[in-house]
Image (spheres, rainbow, N blue to C red):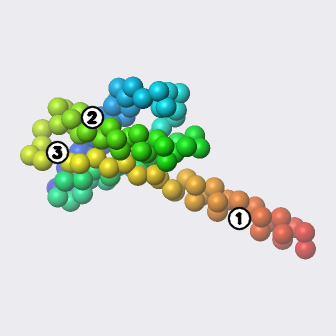
Amino acid sequence: MAQYRREMLESEMKKLITQGFSQLKDPRLKDKFIDINMVRLSKDKSYLDVYVSSLDEDIDTIINILNNAKGMFRTLIAKNIKMFKVPEVRFHKDEGIEASIRINKLIEKIEKNEEGK
């Protein structure tokens, strides 16, 4: 039962954070495609880890901007979800996409080497 509740909270928080992206007024985020790949709420509900990816090359800058605005996201969660303790929001770079691209490139390279033999 507790796992189900945590998954529901994660889903709602993901929606709220996505809505919060539109409220950010930083010009560096204008016209940037930001995708939330995964949201994980800690077991004690004190931390919300948000894994973000972007098609833009400056993902580290985007992560820094989002981490600087994490108070706004926490306030947004507090206003919309009734919880005893509102989690601290932490944004992380999701490296899963980059890893899969690297793996695909390696596979293509191996296939080209195999064809050349």
| Of callouts 2 and 1, the N-terminal one | 2
User: Label 2, on which residue?
Assistant: 72
Q: Position of residue 45 (x, y in %)?
A: 19, 53
Q: Is disc 1 surrounded by few (<14), some (14 to 19) or many (20+) residues within 10 Å? A: few
Q: Is residue 27 left or right of residue 40?
A: right
Which residue is at 90% across, 69% downward?
Answer: 116
Q: Nearer the viewer, residue 28 or 48?
A: 28
Q: Can residue 55 be seen by looking at this rendering?
A: no
Q: Is residue 58 left or right of residue 73?
A: right
Q: Is disc 3 surrounded by few (<14), some (14 to 19) or many (20+) residues within 10 Å? A: some
- Where is 70 relative to 112, above or below? above
The disc labelled 3 sits on which kind of residue? Val
| Of callouts 1 and 3, the N-terminal one | 3
Q: Nearer the viewer, residue 5 or 29?
A: 29
Q: Can residue 68 be seen by looking at this rendering?
A: yes
User: Label 1, on which residue?
Assistant: 106
Q: Position of residue 62 (x, y in %)?
A: 46, 41
Q: Position of residue 66 (x, y in %)?
A: 38, 40
